[in-house]
Image (cartoon, rainbow, N blue to C red):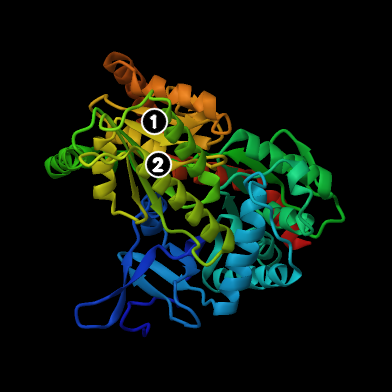
Amino acid sequence: MSSSTQGDRASTASDFVVVANRLPVDRVTNPDGTQGFRRSPGGLVTALEPVMAASEGAWVGWHGGIDEELDSFDKDGIHLVPVPLSEDDLELYYEGFSNSTLWPLYHDVIVPPSYHRTWWDRYKKINQRFADAVLRIAAPNATVWVHDYQLQLVPRLLRLARPDLKIGFFLHIPFPAASLFSQLPWRKQILQGLAGADLVGFQRETDATNFLRCLRRFTDYQTKGREATPSLENDLQNICRADAHPISIDYEQIQRLSRDPQIIARAAQIRHELGNPKTIMLGVDRLDYTKGIRHRLKAYGELLADEQLHAGEVCLIQVASPSRENVGTYIELRDQVELMVGQINGQHDTLSHTTLRYLHHSYPLREMISLYLAADVLLVTALRDGMNLVAKEYVAAHQDGRGVLVLSEFTGAADQLTQSVLVNPHDIDGMKVKIMEAVNMDETEQAKRMKRMNHHLKEFDVAGWSDRFLSELAEINSKSAPAKENVARA
C-alpha cells in the first residue's frame, strides 16, 4: 500500500495522537480482489473522531498483518500510523506478556499468570517501537493519549524523549491490589512507565487507589490525594495524577437503532424462532475466563433441575465471541463451556423448544440490538471486568422500559448501573435467587429501574467520557507548564 494512493500526510506533525495496540480498522478484500481496510465499529473511535478532525489527529497502532510494514495512510478522515509486528512479536509480546502475564494478574489471578523474561524483553521492545512511532509524528506540545495494558511503558518513554508532550494514559481493564501486583517481577518498571503520564485514567475509584498505593510501596514516588510526585533523584520530574474516568457507550446511536422498525421486527422474529418462550435470557461475552460464563451456566442448569425454571417457558441465548483461540487456557475454557451446554440441552431440551442456544460467533451491532430487544433478562456475571459495555448497551436499547439487567458487582458498570439486580457470581445459590427475582419482576418495577439507568447513560456517554478526560489532562498541563519550562531550560 503506497502512501500516495492512501492520502498520506506523514510530513505533517500531529497535535493529537492516540496510541493503542490496534488501529481502528479491519482488513477487507475489495470486490476487485485487492486488500483494503474498513473502519472498525467501536465507541473509542466514535468518541475521538471529532477531536482528531479538529487537531490534525493521528492514530498509532498495529494494522493486523504479520511481518508486514505499511506506510501511514488516511481512512475516513483519520490518519493511521501502522506499527509492524512479527509472528514472534505476537507470541511473546501479545499472547505472552500482555495476555498470559498481565491479563490474568490484573483480573485477580482467576487463572495463574506466567512470568517469563523473554516475554518481558519483547514487551519492552514493542513498547519502544510504539513510542518511536509517536515521536516521529507528534508536533511540539502535542497531546498523546495512550491506551491499555499492552502499552504501559510508553508514557515514560515519551516523557524521557519529549518533556513538552501532554501525556494521558487510560487503562481499560482493572488494576490489581498491591498484594497481587507485588507478584510481578517487573512491577517497578511498569509503575514507572505509567507514571510518565500526566494523567492516568481508570474505570473505577478502587483501581486508581490501587495504582497510587503500588506507586508509593514499590517506587520512589510519594502520593498526596490523587497525585504522585517522584523523588529528586528520579530522572522524571512530572507530577502524575490518577483518576477514575469510567468509559461509556454511544448512547444516541444505540437509542436510534433500538427504534429502527427493521431491528424491532428482527427481535420479534428471534422470539418466534425460539418458540415464543415466556422468558428469554441473554448472555453476551467474549469467550474469556473472566466473564463467569461457567458460573452462569451452572446456575441456569440448577434452576432447570430444581424446576424453578421450566423447559418450553424459558430459553437462554449465550453469545460467546471467539477470543485468543491459540492460548491454552482459552482452548480449555471453550471445551468446558461446550460440554456444559451439551449437558444442559441433553437434559432439558424438548422436540419443540431449545433450552439453551449457544452461539460461538461475533455479531454486527444491528443484530446485537435485536438480541437485546428480544431478551427479557440480560445476565452479566463477570468474575472481574473493567467496565462491561454490553450491560450499558442493553439498558440503552430498552427505551420501552422493559427488561432486567442482572449485573455482577465485580464489574465497573456496577458503580453506575445501581438499579440493576446486583449479584456475586461466586455465590451460585445467591445468583439463582437474583435470576428468579429478575424473571419475576413486574413491569412497573422494570420501567422504574430502566428509566433511572437510561438517565445516567444519556448524561454520561462515550463522548462525555473523552471530553472529561482530555479536559482534565489539559488542566493539569496548564498548571504544570511553568515547571516544564524550568526543566527544559535547566
Residue 210 bears which disc, if any? none
The mark tally for this picture is: 2
Q: Which residue is mark 1?
A: 304
State if disc 1 and disc 2 touch (CB < 8 Å): yes
Q: Nearer the viewer, residue 332 or 70?
A: 332
The mark nearer the N terminus, 2 or 1, is 1
Helix, strand or loop at mark 2: helix
Q: Which residue is nearer to you in this view: 215 or 482? A: 215
Image x and y of residue 182, in percent? 79, 48
| Residue 418 visible in the current orientation | no
Residue of label 2:
344
Q: Amino acid at mark 2?
A: Ile
Q: Residue at x 33, y 15 (%)?
A: 445
Label 1: element kind: helix
Check disc 2: other Cα within 10 Å, few if <14, some if 14-19, many if 20+.
Answer: many
Name the residue at 57% across, 41% down. 384
User: What x and y, as percent, mark residue 474?
Assistant: 55, 46
Quadrant position of the N terminus in the picture: bottom left
Please state, as top left, top right, bottom left or bottom right, where the C terminus lies in the image.
bottom right
x and y percentages locating residue 333 in the rendered image: 52, 54
Identify which amino acid the numbered label 1 is placed on: Leu
Residue 200 in view here: yes
Q: Residue at x 65, y 39 (%)?
A: 208
Q: Is residue 108 left or right of residue 7?
A: right
Neighbours of disc 1 within 10 Å: few (<14), some (14-19), many (20+): some
Q: Nearer the viewer, residue 3 or 356?
A: 356
Q: Quadrant of residue 276?
A: top left
Q: Is residue 218 above or below residue 71?
A: above
In the image, residue 475 above or below residue 95: above
Q: Position of residue 367 (x, y in %)?
A: 25, 49
* Left or right of residue 364: residue 427: right
